[in-house]
Amino acid sequence: MTLVVALALAAPTACSNDGPDAGEARLEVDGEALVERAGGDRDTIDGTTNLHRGDRVSVHDGSAVMRLAGGTVLELREGFDEAADTALVMGDRPELEAGELLITTPEAVDLEADGTEVHVADGAARLTRAFGMSVAAYDAEIVLDSAGVPAEVPALRQMVVPDLGRPPQSPRPITYDDADTWDRRFLGAAMALGGRLEDFADGLTSNLPEGEGRTPGFFRLVLPGLDDEGAFDAELLADRLDREPGDTLIGAAISDLGERGAFADRWSAVFSFRDAGAAWGIVALDQAVRSGPLIGSVEDALNTSFAESAFAPPPATSTPGPSATPPATPAGPGGADVPISPGSPGGGPSTSPPTAPPPTTPPITPPVTPPPALEPVVNPGSDLLDGLVGGLLGGLLGPGG
């Protein structure tokens, strides 16, 4: 018995059969990584190995996955874009020394970078160590402690800590890179949705007559759901008059479909986030608005606005006779006139018809139609809010709504 105990104590520590213990990890390399053991040995790994406290791993080719206790997964990779190769020291609080790290945790995990403590809870986030450190929350909640200076980073925000102990910058909307596989994994559907919404906004702005699309009446006409929002009035719209009508339409549609707080609060949150630099797909995701109803609402609004432009009365081509009375037409959205009956620009015959028949003007064909659906960058059968990790997002926005 004494011999067995002695052999057990002498054997090197390994991950338990139930998975890694605290301070340990199972490393799986797709490519090549260098592991510098706490005892001084150096191993080149192109498969799997166990990591223990004090072991340093750096990925020079490809990528690697570290599986920690409790289901937390850390992903490392060779330098992407301007980032360095990921280098990390294993411990109770893994420390990122260089490059980028993707964290996915079903509960919570504590890490460190450039002396700043990072607590990531319930979701996915990116940690970067370069000049200072920065974090970006896909759907996790992050709390930082930089030499006693705390800060919180909500989901879909990012933050930079330039130097240890200095107040971190305020959270900003998360940004993404189309070529980054991590961004595409967690934000791909939002990226595709944002592109479509930008195209819709540009199409509306370019097809509206000058001065059109800047009144509550116009937006109530093209977005009928706003009729039920008593808070939507000229005062609420006043601070958006310098914005292009198409941009206002997208924000109004997201505010209309959102359910987080009162309408005026949603309106403020949507446009404040947008003004801070968020892409429209990220804004929709932040408001938990599904892509299907949003795309449908915006397409209906575009069709309505195009129809109004098509049937707008053309400029007068002749001067009516002295006894002629201009036909009465009801006021349309934004002060434009809407003919009494579609397709009859004059509204009725003049009491003094001209000697020659007036030229006929066919209905205007909208020069731009809503763009075709983009190929999704994630599983097309999933919805934008049905696939993301974490309870905040509720799932990926998908084409089905």
Image: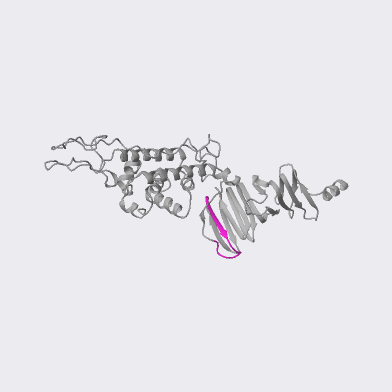
Image position of 131 (left or right of 302): right
> Magenta residues, as a range?
155-168
Q: Residue furthest right?
A: 3
Q: Residue furthest left?
A: 323
Residue 5 among magenta residues: no
Residue 171 seen in the figure? yes
Q: Nearer the viewer, residue 368 or 89?
A: 368
Q: Is residue 163 above or below residue 315?
A: below
Q: Position of residue 64 (x, y in %)?
A: 69, 46
Q: Nearer the viewer, residue 83 or 187?
A: 83
The prevailing secondary structure element of the residues shown in magenta is loop
Q: Is residue 301 above or below residue 95?
A: above
For the N terminus, the image quarter is top right
Q: Position of residue 286 (x, y in %)?
A: 48, 47
Residue at image position (58%, 46%) is: 179
Q: Nearer the viewer, residue 367 or 58?
A: 367
Residue 20 seen in the figure? no
Count of marks, rendered view: 0
* Rendering quarter of residue 219: top left
Looking at the picture, the colour scheme in use is: one colour
Q: Position of residue 36 (x, y in %)?
A: 76, 53
Residue at image position (54%, 56%) is: 152
Residue 158 among magenta residues: yes
Residue at image position (45%, 52%) is: 274
Q: Residue furthest bottom?
A: 166
Q: Nearer the viewer, residue 115 or 382?
A: 382
Q: Residue furthest front?
A: 356
* Rendering quarter of residue 329: top left
Image position of 322 (left or right of 85): left
Image position of 248 (left or right of 54): left
